[in-house]
């Protein structure tokens, strides 16, 4: 499909630089059938049904942005995907000043050797020493805010909490599963009381989620792989929910992509552990989910393509036009939508 079909104009003032407070006070655009209604995230217990199951991603964002030097050159690195105990693939700023075998000094006693430049421009970084890389990042790294926020303000102490969901426990993401940022213990308790359950899976979101689609046709775009896991008890619960007439509602496109990667053509969700590079565009037949809670995405992005596949391109263009006109806040710290095809 022509990537231009997924374009729209977003006024820059619609980009949220901080999350709503309290988190569940964020606005919620419910798109169901041919209709739309304006709600808040706190209304979710009334918008969903008893027997539905929300699926959260329990990945935890690591301080994956590093600033260092190679000789006299300033080098920036955003870790993307773990490839081994001490090796991470990274997108590197000023990469032309880095050659295979060069050591980059990130300060605080943290150094890494660069090698293996990929076709996508990423570079492998092998961290020196014996300390766990997680400890090195705690010393030298900072929270990897999305570029559309980082370009307007620096990360600060608030972001260490703001950019982490209440479910975060499995360290490894370099971007937050932002739809879950809206949830609080009080909201989850209200959902439980309404008979709406929840479960968790893990997908470590990579920096590739922020890369623009540079191809003119979706068939020519190559997705970056991300590692995920759905265990047997979780797969069993997802299948049992649907068998009992409930709906599986993915919270975030990361949860949705992993469920769809684990679902067979028969609609049965099976345990999954490994990389997924699933790219969902209009024409895709969904197998494992019945709805989605997600934020508002960038124009021409793979995520806007995904929601258009779920709801229809015309409907999502209309929904986004309504959201822009009605003052909804966009992107990672912005408002949310509940999409029920």
Image: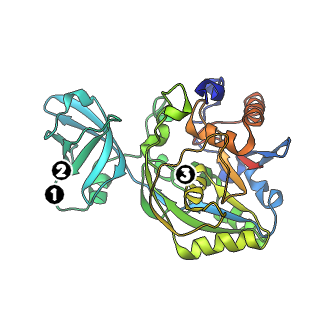
Which structural element holds mark 2? loop
- The earlier-in-sequence mark between 2 and 1 is 2
Q: Quadrant of residue 27?
A: top right
- The earlier-in-sequence mark between 3 and 1 is 1
Which structural element holds mark 3? loop
Residues tagged 3 and 1 counted as in contact (Cβ below 8 A): no
Q: Nearer the viewer, residue 18 or 182?
A: 182
Instruction: From the top left corner, tell me how far across and down residue 236 is, in percent.
Output: 62, 75
Within 10 Å of disc 3 (Cα), the crowding (few <14, some 14-19, many 20+) is many
* Residue under pointer 3: 177
Instruction: From the top left corner, tell me how far across and down residue 148 is, in percent.
Output: 51, 32
Q: Quadrant of residue 78?
A: top left
**121 with respect to 35 (left or right):** left
Q: Nearer the viewer, residue 266 or 323?
A: 266
Within 10 Å of disc 1 (Cα), the crowding (few <14, some 14-19, many 20+) is few
* Residue under pointer 1: 129
Instruction: From the top left corner, tell me how far across and down residue 126 is, in percent.
Output: 21, 50
- Report the residue that reaches farthest toward the right: 35
Instruction: From the top left corner, tell me how far across and down residue 127 is, in percent.
Output: 21, 52
* Residue under pointer 2: 109
Residue at image x 50%, y 62%?
202
Nearer to us of marks 2 and 1 is 1
**27 with respect to 103 (left or right):** right
* Mark 2 to mark 1 CA distance (whole Å): 9 Å
């Amino acid at each position: 499909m022509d990537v231009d079909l997924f374009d729209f104009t977003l006024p820059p003032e619609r980009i949220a630089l901080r999350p709503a407070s309290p988190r569940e006070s964020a606005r919620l655009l419910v798109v169901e059938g041919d209709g739309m209604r304006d709600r808040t995230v706190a209304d979710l217990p009334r918008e969903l049904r008893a027997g539905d199951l929300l699926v959260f991603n329990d990945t935890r964002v690591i301080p994956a942005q590093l600033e260092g030097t190679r000789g006299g050159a300033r080098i920036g690195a955003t870790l993307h995907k773990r490839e081994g105990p001490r090796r991470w693939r990274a997108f590197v700023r000023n990469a032309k000043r880095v050659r295979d075998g060069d050591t980059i000094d990130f300060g605080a006693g943290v150094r890494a050797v660069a090698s293996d430049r990929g076709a996508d421009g990423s570079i492998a970084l092998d961290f020196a020493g014996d300390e766990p890389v997680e400890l090195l990042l705690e010393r030298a790294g900072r929270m990897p805010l999305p570029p559309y926020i980082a370009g307007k303000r620096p990360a600060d102490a608030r972001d260490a909490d703001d950019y982490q969901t209440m479910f975060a426990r499995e360290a490894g993401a370099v971007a937050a599963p932002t739809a879950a940022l809206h949830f609080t213990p009080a909201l989850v308790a209200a959902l439980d009381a309404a008979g709406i359950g929840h479960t968790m899976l893990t997908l470590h979101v990579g920096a590739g989620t922020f890369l623009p689609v540079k191809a003119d046709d979706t068939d020519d775009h190559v997705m970056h792989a991300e590692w995920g896991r759905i265990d047997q008890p979780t797969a069993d619960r997802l299948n049992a929910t649907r068998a009992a007439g409930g709906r599986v509602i993915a919270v975030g496109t990361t949860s949705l992509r992993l469920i769809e990667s684990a679902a067979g053509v028969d609609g049965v969700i099976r345990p999954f552990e490994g990389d997924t590079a699933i790219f969902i565009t209009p024409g895709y037949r969904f197998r494992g989910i019945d709805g989605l809670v997600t934020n508002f995405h960038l124009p021409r992005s793979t995520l806007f393509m995904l929601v258009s596949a779920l709801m229809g391109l015309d409907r999502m263009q209309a929904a986004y036009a309504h959201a822009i006109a009605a003052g909804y806040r966009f992107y990672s710290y912005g408002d949310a939508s509940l999409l029920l095809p």
